[in-house]
Image: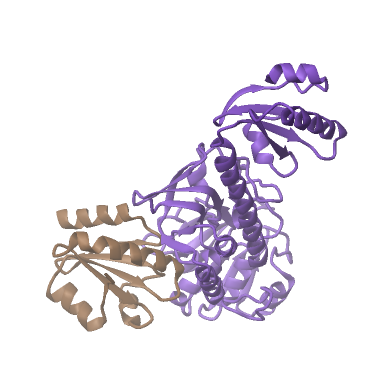
Amino acid sequence: MSLQQLNSNRFEEIIYDNCEPCLVIFSKKDCHVCKEVVPMLEELQPQYEGKFGFYYVDVEEDKNLFQRFSLKGVPQILFFNEGEYQGKVAGKVEEETIEEKIAEVLGA
Amino acid sequence: MDNIYDLIIIGGGPAGLSAAIYGGRAKLKTLVINKGTIGGLVDTTREIVNYPGYIQVSGPDLMKDFKKHAEHFNVEFLKEEVISVDFSQEEKIIKTKKGKEFSAKAVIIACGSEPRILNIPGEKTLRGSGVAYCATCDAEFFEGEDVVVVGSGDQAIEEGMYITKFARKVTVIILHDEGILDCNKVSAERAFNNEKMEFIWNSTIEAVLGEENVEGVKIKNLKTGSSSELTCQGVFFFVGMIPSTHFLKDSGLEMDQRGYIPVNEGMETNLEGIYAVGDNRVKYLRQVVSAAGDGATAAVAAERFIEELNYFNSKILQNDNKILLLFFNVFMNESVEFSTLLEKLISENGDEYKIFKVDMATKKSLAEKYAIEKVPSVVVLDKGKEIKRLDCSMNVEKLKSQLF
């Protein structure tokens, strides 16, 4: 299943209004590393159905979002819980790294 | 079973896809296992101007055409990562990260290369926070900022120029003496004329500085030994590639120190039925056109190997007669004379034995399988099992006594 894409408004709602525990991948279309990481998240997503949200931001479509987090490159996966930023991982990451980070966020 | 193939190709870059086209066209049941996007390194190349037939094409577009071509010949594709192999048996086993297992008669290693990591302080921790490896992906994040590029090959200089479209200034750190770049001449000239490009010669990078984000780099001058710091917001590393062959470490496959696999002109490795192509093999030129050539060669070699294997399994190992495997060399008189003698002897003595002649020049794998060191040699098989070897005497009686 493909990841739900967020624009600035939806981003506000989900992260800060609903305070949902989730991750957001900042990606772009012509980045080859993103093309490896995004499908990995898509496959991981069903395991966390109802527990942890998986979202997608296209940095070319929503420039202000990556500027806000002063990101320097894609892909980057940002983690949130209760409206607070919980850290990020960058580049080509393995499935295990994501699982560990989710466990850490949910456990905190 | 669904997981049994004639030919499995690990990697979907130009070498792997070319092998797939040839494999599919030869009606081999062919599978390409590719972990990332199709096209490999070419998928990250914005512009290709030296692939014959295409005056100018983007890497991804060219690779889409390659893939379409392979699909046209019924090649199957699987997006997965191969994590281990067992090449010790006739059926080669391949295991993926998700726990799938495949077998094939022949395997072509075409899994390409990955950027070399320098392992200097800050490189890993600041990745995504200013440390980058892909200009197409990340250059625009450095709009109006100062960027350092490490390296002087084609990729470093061409990507560096691309970054100048966004950055205020691009400083290239170069190992060599002033004026010497490793890249092609056209790009070097363009880079020297680019007002936003600056060069620091005889130098290397020692560390990436910064806490949350990149704030600068520490540069060491190799001539004077002195270190200096340069403020910047981004560092792009283009310090060469290393072959992605680490998962083959324990496979018995021969590799050099850097992980490249030596092959002969048929792309054959030291293991029977295993081939290595493109950026995985020791070679002179690493381009799309030469990768494609490697793929074609390997697939044809694999096709012949599989044909031989099938023939041997069906005609020889499952034959009800006793078989005499005669290894010979057509260019050696002694071989030919012995062959004539043996054939005459067998035909005069009923149908207990059948002779299969094996030309050493073309059936190398069989010769290796039976560890044949000289010609002529004769291996006697009964229902596929070796029962003895003959002393290849030119004396008819001596020869006869060994057989009847």
Of A64 and B99, nearer the camera is B99
Where residue A90 appears, as percent x and y from the top left, is 37, 62
Q: Is residue B175 visible?
A: yes
At which x and y percent is residue B222?
66, 52
Q: Position of residue B254 (x, y in %)?
A: 60, 40
Which image quadrant for residue B52?
Answer: bottom right
Tell me which residue sits at (29%, 57%) in the image: A98
Q: How is the image coloured?
A: by chain
**In the image, is residue B280 above or below residue A50?**
above
Q: Does residue A71 appear to the left or right of B117 in the view shown?
A: left
Residue visible at 60% across and 51% down in the picture: B302
Q: Is residue A28 above or below residue B200?
A: below
Q: Is residue B25 above or below residue B162?
A: above
Observer able to see residue B373: no
Question: Which chain is in purple here?
Answer: B
In the image, taking residue A48 as reference, residue B95 lies left or right, namely right
**B126 or A31, nearer to the observer:** A31
Apparent colour of chain A: brown
Residue drawn at 48 percent across, 58 percent down: B31
Residue A89: name its quadrant.
bottom left
Please identify the residue farthest to the right as the structure is shown: B333
Q: Position of residue A81 (x, y in %)?
A: 17, 64
